[in-house]
Amino acid sequence: MTDSYLPKDFLWGFATASYQIEGAPHQDGRADSIWDTFCRRPGKIADGSSGDVACDSYNRTAEDIELLKLTGAKSYRFSLSWSRIIPIGGRNDPINDKGLQHYVKFVDDLRAAGIEPMITLYHWDLPEGLEQRYGGLLNKEEFSLDFEHYARVCFKAFGDKVKYWITFNEPWCSSVLGYSIGQFAPGRTSDRSKSDVGDSSTEPWIAGHSLLLAHGRAVKAYRDDFKAKDGGQIGITLNGDWAMPWDENDPKDVEAANRKIEFAISWFGDPIYFGKYPDSMRKQLGDRLPHITPDEVALIQGSNDFYGMNHYCANYIRHKEGEPDITDFAGHLQILYQNKAGEWVGPETQSPWLRPHPLGFRKLIKWLSDRYGGPTFYVTENGTSLKGESQLPKEELLNDEFRCEYFRGYIGALADAHAKDGVDVRGYSAWSLMDNFEWAEGYETRFGVTYVDYEGGQKREPKKSAKEIGQIFDKYIKKD
Ligand code: GBH
């Protein structure tokens, strides 16, 4: 037995995202999102695939709820496809009641099964109509007003059935991967071998600013017109890895590791909690980083009822000499998987960026808790892929002891953060309920606790971890 624990009503479950699981891209009136069009561009997705079928979850909500019940999950975090609800996307465009009612019924079914719904409004699938109309995230006024409208349509339709709202999933990814590296939709970048449009020196910062403003407007709408009667909470989900100095005796590496977290997380966290961008970012980016106007500060500062935390891994960070590149988005540093002594941060997985290091979870959540004045945390994603899994036979994918070990380590570290460091954490969603479309990596990377047979009619089969995760929580959650 352990002396660390998680609080009594701890809300644990699983997470997914609309484009990664739903399929049915044009069923019941859904229109294209930027991910539908991005996947059609040659060379963007590793295996040339798309979310056209994915797990076919749009047509299998009952099966997915059965999977959740089997695990004993208390909550389910999923995202809404904006272009199912408002196909073109804008505040004067028609609402598609069929798409909206699909989700209302899903929420009713979840609740009937005793599973608490947590809704992400935006997990990267912007309606293509808005990309076409005004350049999507690059137009902060139009985008933020359209997002507020879409959020209001959802708040109204779900009312008091939904108590947990997340505006945006990982704005860092939308901004950097969408507008700097061009690895994610809409694929804009200064790298002309990858795209003929984009300016990586300015666009990621503009996109990030728009996301913050849109978040602020949606939160104000919820607080002004829904929160009192519906009794829910609303926040944003930020991603970020733990960062450790490559050479812990070199103050420049120590500083660089801290700066890495500021560029990845405080970019959004500081405006939300302090009303300003981090000094380290202003220093490197100057006026390329937008200035938050006083009206915007009023909307953005204080706009989190809770902090949604996505976390997967840790890295070693080494400072760089010389002047930062104009397209640098990381804080002028190198991200490494080994430290100066040659120690690996953790074992390999199928994802090149992901090497597990559970202690980093405890460290990072404490770092965030200290910086932001002890907010309430919901961990909204945490999980892993398995090394070499595209070659592994199905039996080995089902017997995912590596993933079980990952969850034991990470959930244990979270319990330590709660019990020993005093972090206020109240929930956790594992990524993911099932294998799904892993964005630019296609289907060869599998994060699910459920195996999905993409060749065999999307049949689902629980892996070892699907049964085990409940036992891990059972060990840590306080009984009375
Ligand atoms: C999450 O992002 C997503 O929310 C989810 O949809 C996804 O399926 C899941 O993770 C698994 O990948 O090497 O500089 O390009 C994870 C956070 C942050 C992980 C960016 C990959 C790449 C950094 N991601 N990171 S870089």
Image (cartoon, rainbow, N blue to C red):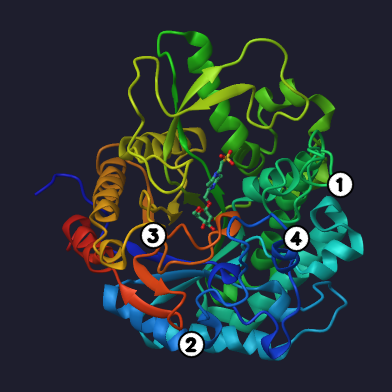
Above or below 65: residue 357: above
Q: Position of residue 147 (x, y in %)?
A: 75, 65
Spatial CA distance of label 2 from label 4 is 37 Å
Q: How far apart are marks 1 and 2 (CA)?
A: 43 Å
| Image marks 1 and 4: residues in contact by CB distance under 8 Å | no
Nearer to me, 195 or 304: 195
Q: Is residue 353 left or right of residue 9?
A: right
Residue 453 is situated, as x and y percent measured from the top left of the image, at 41, 75
Q: Mark 1 points at which residue?
A: 197
Q: For the residue with label 1, is its CB less than 8 Å from the closest atom of ligand 1?
A: no
State the mark number for residue 108: 2
Label 4 sits on residue: 41
Distance between the alpha carbons at the discs numbered 2 and 3: 22 Å
Residue at disc 3, secondary structure: strand
Instruction: Give the label, 2 or 4, closer to the camera.
Output: 4
Q: Can residue 302 be seen in this view?
A: no
Decide: marks 2, 4 in contact (CB < 8 A)? no
